[in-house]
């Protein structure tokens, strides 16, 4: 799937917080709290460091003894966590992977024809 997963031109990071392997409540995928953060300038890197510091400070103030970050987020709620670190809710935030692996194939032939025409024109 190299064509489908081609590297884009933007450089940056997707930030997930709270993932872990099994301990108390089972496996947790980290919650995507920043779907994409550009990392092109020094200011962008500083914004990433500032976000990390906000998360650490919030965790220090709100976590219970022996509680992990993902467990704290589940206990207090994602919205409260995001408010605490100063992020707005975004529709691209993901808290769990899809449970339905099926993909709709409506219009598949039209899409293939469009892609082939684009390749032929290039």
Image (spheres, rainbow, N blue to C red):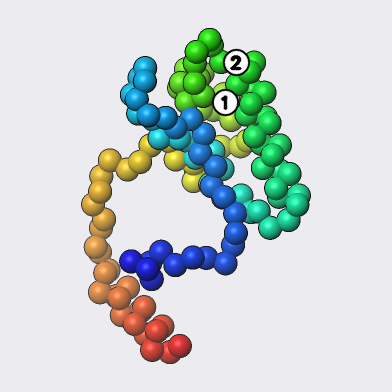
Mark 1, residue position: 81
Of the 4 image quadrants, the one containing the C terminus is bottom left
**Residue at left 48%, top 30%?**
18
Q: Is residue 37 above or below residue 4?
A: above
**Residue at left 34%, top 82%?**
116
**Residue at left 67%, top 42%?**
48
Q: Is residue 6 above or below residue 80?
A: below
Between marks 2 and 1, how big is the CA–CA gap? 10 Å
Residue 64 visible to the viewer: yes
Nearer to the camera, 18 or 81: 18
Mark 2, residue position: 62
Q: Residues within 10 Å of mark 1 (few under 14, many from 20)?
A: many
Nearer to the camera, 54 or 76: 54
The residue lying furthest to the top in this view is: 65
Percent position of residue 66, x then y: 50, 13
Residue 77 visible to the viewer: no
- Quarter assignment of residue 86: top right
**Secondary structure of the residue carrying numbered label 1:** helix
Percent position of residue 101, x then y: 25, 48
Of the 4 image quadrants, the one containing the N terminus is bottom left
Nearer to the camera, 56 or 105: 56
Q: Is residue 99 above or below residue 104?
A: above
Query: Do the numbered discs 2 and 1 sit on residues whose CB atoms are within 8 Å?
Result: no
Number of numbered markers: 2
Q: Earlier in the sequence, mark 2 or mark 1?
A: 2
Q: Relative to residue 42, is residue 83 drawn left or right?
A: left
The residue lying furthest to the bottom in this view is: 121
Q: Nearer the viewer, mark 2 or mark 1?
A: 2
Percent position of residue 20, x then y: 42, 30
**Residue at left 64%, top 15%?**
61
Percent position of residue 71, x then y: 46, 21
């Amino acid at each position: 799937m190299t064509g489908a997963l081609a590297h884009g031109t933007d450089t940056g990071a997707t930030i997930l917080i709270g993932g872990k392997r099994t301990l108390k409540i089972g496996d947790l995928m980290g919650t995507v709290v920043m779907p994409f953060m550009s990392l092109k300038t020094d200011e962008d890197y500083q914004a990433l460091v500032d976000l990390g510091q906000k998360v650490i400070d919030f965790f220090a103030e709100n976590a219970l003894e022996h509680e992990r970050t993902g467990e704290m987020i589940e206990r207090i709620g994602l919205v409260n966590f995001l408010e605490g670190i100063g992020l707005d809710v975004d529709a691209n935030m993901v808290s769990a992977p899809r449970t339905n692996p099926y993909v709709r194939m409506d219009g598949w032939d039209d899409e293939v024809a469009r892609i082939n025409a684009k390749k032929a024109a290039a």
